[in-house]
Amino acid sequence: QLQLVESGGGLVQPGGSLRLSCAASGFPLDYYAIGWFRQAPGKEREGALCISSNDGSTYYADTVKGRFTISRDNASNTVYLQMSSLKPDDTAVYYCAADPSIVIMSRTPGNIRYWGQGTQVTVKS
């Protein structure tokens, strides 16, 4: 069974850091386009950052560029999201996603094949 399981969410103060993990089972992550999406209350789900399936290039939304980093550990079949300089606007449910495309952020969320269950990140004083 193909599955993505996120962990590492929580409450953090503005300016703080947090690392999310996404463990995949049932398929090798390095053959898929992978990424992190987020959904704030009352807003649509949006792509934050991703790794392409063909050459490992990374792509970042302007809102997270310079603050968030995505990485992948093929040995453990896990993808990470390192977040720093967090802002209250980063508060959202964060979802790990995988898709047999090249750049997952080029796909609309409704067309992405695999999703994790999501993990809440709250940034406030």
Image (tube, grey):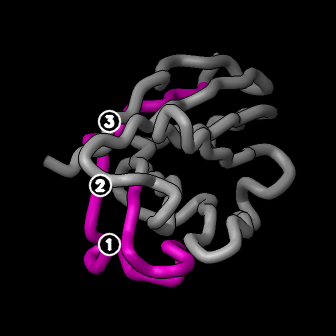
In the displayed structure image, the side of residue 46 where residue 67 appears, left or right: right
Query: Which portion, as a residue range, is magenta?
Result: 97-123
Question: Distance from label 1 to label 2 (Cα)?
Answer: 8 Å
Q: What element carries label 1?
A: loop
- Check if mark 3's residue and mark 1's residue have beta carbons within 8 Å: no
Amino acid type at image mark 2: Trp
Per the image, is 101 magenta? yes
**Does 74 appear above or below 57?**
above
Query: Which residue is identified by label 3?
Result: 5
**Does 71 appear above or below 7?**
below
Foreground residue among 79 and 55: 55
Answer whether residue 59 is visible to the viewer in this image. Answer: no
Q: What element carries label 2?
A: strand
Residue 96: x percent and y percent?
Answer: 42, 49
Q: Residue 115 carries which label?
A: 2
Residue 57: x percent and y percent?
Answer: 73, 69
